[in-house]
Image: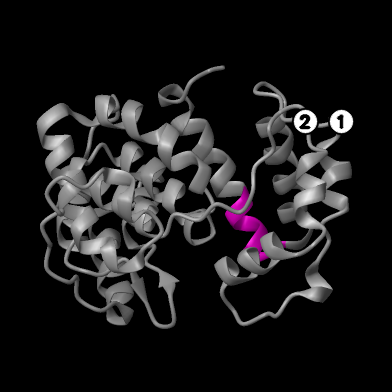
Amino acid sequence: MTSTPLSPALRTQLVAAARWDAEYGAGLSNHLPMALTALARLGASDERLTAFAQHYTERLPPMPPLEAWPAGDAWRARLGQPRAWPAYRRLWREWIDAEGAADVLAQALPGLMPGVAAAAFHGPIRVAYALAANHADELADALAYWSCRWFECGAADGAGSNADTQAVLATLDLNAELTHDGLIARQMAQAAAHPRFAPAIARWRVDAHITLPRLAMLAAERYAARAEFTVLHLVTSAHALRVLLPWLDAD
């Protein structure tokens, strides 16, 4: 998966974290595996990992039982269906066990990427952190979460007339026109359905070598200036895409 060694303490915590559901409350994403991985990579002690996990799991419901994937169904058949979470967990685990993480990612990521907005980017973010942790079961659960929350909010075809990412984004300042109910994913869905969204995306010329670094820089600048929680997801999602690029077609 990756060359990063997995510490025994982090392995133990990630195994335990698999007992908890992917969401809690009114649709909030479970950040426990990602947070544990980040803490471990920052040098947290075993005791710190344990204490964090104990505190965080107080809010989490238990994981539902695994379900068999319907025989003969293509893996994309239930994308974007939250109730498919238990079945996707089993599907990805069995697929990774059979073919290995690298081959599975090479086959699956091109199909998952159009739904990169899954759960406010938590799908790809969790996959990237699972790769950082070098943990196959967590990778399977991360892919399952991305799959069941897969959401396509629109796509540029790369042939737009405006290469200025910042100019395109400026036309999409829809904050005052959205209903703010606390869930970023719902606000993203509202924005994607707004009449101005599709025309703006159509003008956007996406460059494989420029667009992602530019988005990452804009997100970092915005977060440094205002420390907005929503913008933090743009920072971490840009990083996640950098991690996933080796498994995507460079073209």
* The quarter of the displayed image where residue 18 is located: bottom left
The circle drawn on residue 161 is 1
State whether residue 179 is above or below residue 84.
Answer: below
- Residue at image position (55%, 52%) is 152
State whether residue 180 is above or below residue 90.
Answer: below
| Quadrant into which the C terminus falls | top right
Query: Which structural element holds mark 1?
Result: loop
Q: Nearer the viewer, residue 37 or 231?
A: 231
Query: Which structural element holds mark 2?
Result: loop
Q: Nearer the viewer, residue 29 or 73?
A: 73
The image position of residue 25, as x and y in percent, is: 40, 82
Q: Residues within 10 Å of mark 1 (few under 14, many from 20)?
A: few
The image position of residue 8, as x and y in percent, is: 15, 44
Q: Is residue 69 left or right of residue 212?
A: left
- Residue at image position (67%, 69%) is 190
- Residue at image position (33%, 37%) is 131
The image position of residue 133, as x and y in percent, is: 29, 41
- Residue at image position (40%, 41%) is 128
Asked if the residue under mark 2 is in contact with the one under mark 1, i.e. CB atoms within 8 Å, the reply is: yes
Q: Residues within 10 Å of mark 2 (few under 14, many from 20)?
A: some
Q: Amino acid at mark 1?
A: Ser
| Quadrant into which the N terminus falls | top left
* The quarter of the displayed image where residue 82 is located: bottom left
Q: Amino acid at mark 2?
A: Arg
The image position of residue 117, as x and y in percent, is: 54, 53
* The quarter of the displayed image where residue 104 is located: top left
Q: Is residue 245 magenta?
A: no
Q: Is residue 236 left or right of residue 7?
A: right
Q: Name the residue carrying label 2.
A: 205
Q: CA distance from mark 1 to mark 2?
A: 6 Å
The boundaries of the magenta stretch are 227-234
